[in-house]
Image (spheres, rainbow, N blue to C red):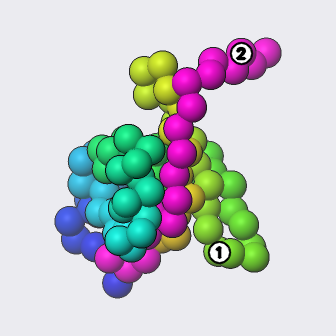
């Protein structure tokens, strides 16, 4: 079942979301507390998930069924561990760091 709030169109079997603001996140209470403690906002996580789903740049863990995605926002890099669900994306954990990694 597709979430009509976060899905705009399907083209050639790929799902496209209109914008990161429309990403629907779900979190257990203990995850919400952890993210609050780490000062990670829902808007940050929505951007990470949106980029990962649109670009396909994400890692998959067959053991847990989770995806790991990252995105640089400003001077920080945000990481999200999540599982796609019919209603949106279940966030299992996330973290952030402000180290700049130069890639060649």
> From what the image shows, is residue 32 above or below residue 36?
below
Q: Secondary structure at mark 2?
A: loop
Q: Please state, as top left, top right, bottom left or bottom right, where the C terminus lies in the image.
A: top right
- Verify whether residue 88 appears in magenta: yes
Q: Is residue 42 visible?
A: yes
Crowding near pointer 2: few (<14 within 10 Å), some, many (20+)? few
Q: Residue furthest left?
A: 5
Q: Which residue is mark 1?
A: 65
Horizontal side of residue 79 vs 23, given as left or right = right
**Viewer-nearest residue: 37 or 76:** 37
Q: Are marks 1 and 2 in contact (CB under 8 Å)?
A: no
Q: Residue at x 48, y 19 (%)?
A: 75
Residue 36 as seen in the image, left or right of residue 75: left
Q: Is residue 3 left or right of residue 79?
A: left
In the image, residue 90 lies at what x, y percent?
43, 69
Question: As drawn, which residue projects farthest toward the bottom?
Answer: 1
Query: Is 24 included in the stretch rendered in magenta?
Result: no
Q: Quadrant of residue 85?
A: bottom left
Q: What is the C-alpha distance between the residues marked 1 and 2?
A: 30 Å
Q: Which quadrant is home to the N terminus? A: bottom left
Q: In this rendering, does residue 50 appear at all?
A: no
Q: Which region of the structure is painted magenta?
A: 85-104
- All told, the count of numbered labels is 2
Taking depth in this image into account, of 99 and 10 the one nearest to the observer is: 99
> In the rendered view, would you say 5 is above or below 69?
below
> Which residue corresponds to the image point at 24% horizontal and 48% vertical from the top-left?
21
Q: Is residue 65 above or below residue 99?
A: below
Q: Is the residue 103 above or below the residue 28 in the image?
A: above
Q: Residue at x 38, y 41 (%)?
A: 39
Give the numbered dot on residue 102.
2
Q: Residue furthest right?
A: 104
Per the image, label 1 sits on a secondary structure element best described as loop
């Amino acid at each position: 079942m597709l979430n009509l709030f976060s899905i705009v169109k399907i083209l050639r079997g790929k799902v496209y979301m209109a914008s990161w603001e429309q990403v629907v996140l779900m979190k257990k209470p203990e995850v919400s507390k952890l993210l609050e403690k780490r000062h990670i906002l829902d808007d940050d996580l929505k951007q990470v998930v949106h980029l990962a789903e649109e670009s396909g740049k994400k890692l998959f863990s067959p053991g847990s069924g989770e995806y790991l995605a990252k995105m640089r926002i400003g001077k920080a890099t945000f990481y999200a561990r999540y599982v796609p669900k019919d209603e949106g994306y279940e966030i299992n954990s996330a973290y952030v760091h402000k180290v700049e990694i130069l890639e060649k």
